[in-house]
Image (cartoon, rainbow, N blue to C red):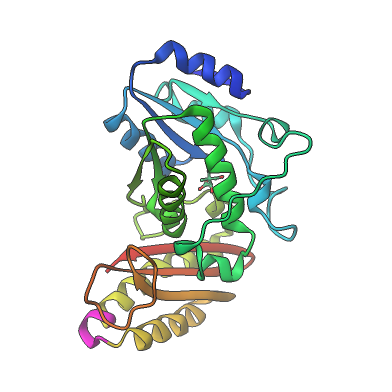
Amino acid sequence: MTQVVTTVAELRAALALLKPARIGMVPTMGALHDGHVSLVTEAKKHADHVVVSIFVNPTQFAPNEDFDAYPRTLDADLKKLGDAAAIVFTPTAREMYPEGFATTITVGGPSAGLETDFRPHFFAGVATVVAKLLIAALPDIAVFGEKDYQQLLVVKQLVRDLGLPIRIIGAPTLREADGLALSSRNAYLSADERKIAASLNAILKDAIATARSTGNLRAAEATAIEALWNAGFAHVDYIAIRDAESLDHVTALERPARILAAAKVGKTRLIDNMAI
Ligand code: PAF
């Protein structure tokens, strides 16, 4: 039976009853889909009990973004999880950011560029809330999706730099049959936009093939950007081939690399990435 708690004190009391068992954590913003369930499944491989947090974190949204529209579906989320999570932590904004809250965590390294060029507020909001969630639960491991690849590297950097005794595990992206990465924001897509959205992953695969066969990474990126425009994307924020560990710029495929993309279909911003 899943226990739903809303305060850090309740969370810690519930966890104390489970200790010394190994605890895994999966931080989410809710609107859970099979991708989130796969993160919980991954967490269960490394832990005896899993805590899922559901919190739409205001500090990672800019004023012009979709914080108000972001789907909040707690009942459906609890159903989706079934009894996979021992504890679901659903704090209020006041619980996470009490009156007078004045701390922001800024992570350097992998947060530079890419998402930060288009959402400059984003990683400080993510790092601050993830640090708070991890400190609240102090799990042995925490699982984050590779779907948000830059976020995964930022969280790893944060945990390393703050010396938190928690192992961060990346879990592979779950996709629809046509390649579209599962995302809570896919719910915003109209039927026409959904068709366009599917081409993002196909275009990334083509770009990987071009990069491998020609070795010309900038040309592969440029061709992919043009392909996105031709497929009907309304805006392309970036397609970039980077070092897979640091996200540094690379000019050749000499070490593991990653292709990362962000583009808008209509008003919906999609991100995706793949290993090269
Ligand atoms: O990936 C997400 O859902 C969020 O960015 C996270 C990690 C739960 C922090 O709010």
Image quarter in which the C terminus is found: bottom left
Image quarter in which the N terminus is found: top left
* Vertical relation: 72 (above or below) 161: above
x%, y% of residue 91?
A: 63, 29
- Residue at 40% x, 14% y: name it: 18
Q: Is residue 58 left or right of residue 201?
A: right
Please say whether residue 181 is visible from this viewpoint: no
x%, y% of residue 85?
A: 43, 25
x%, y% of residue 200?
A: 43, 69
Highlighted magenta segment, given as a residue range:
211-215
Residue 125 colored magenta? no
Q: Is residue 132 left or right of residue 156?
A: right
x%, y% of residue 210?
A: 27, 82
* Vertical relation: 34 (above or below) 151: above
- Residue at 68% x, 54% y: name it: 66
Magenta segment's dominant SS is helix
- Seen as rendered, the residue at the extreme right is 99
- Residue at 28% x, 32% y: name it: 46
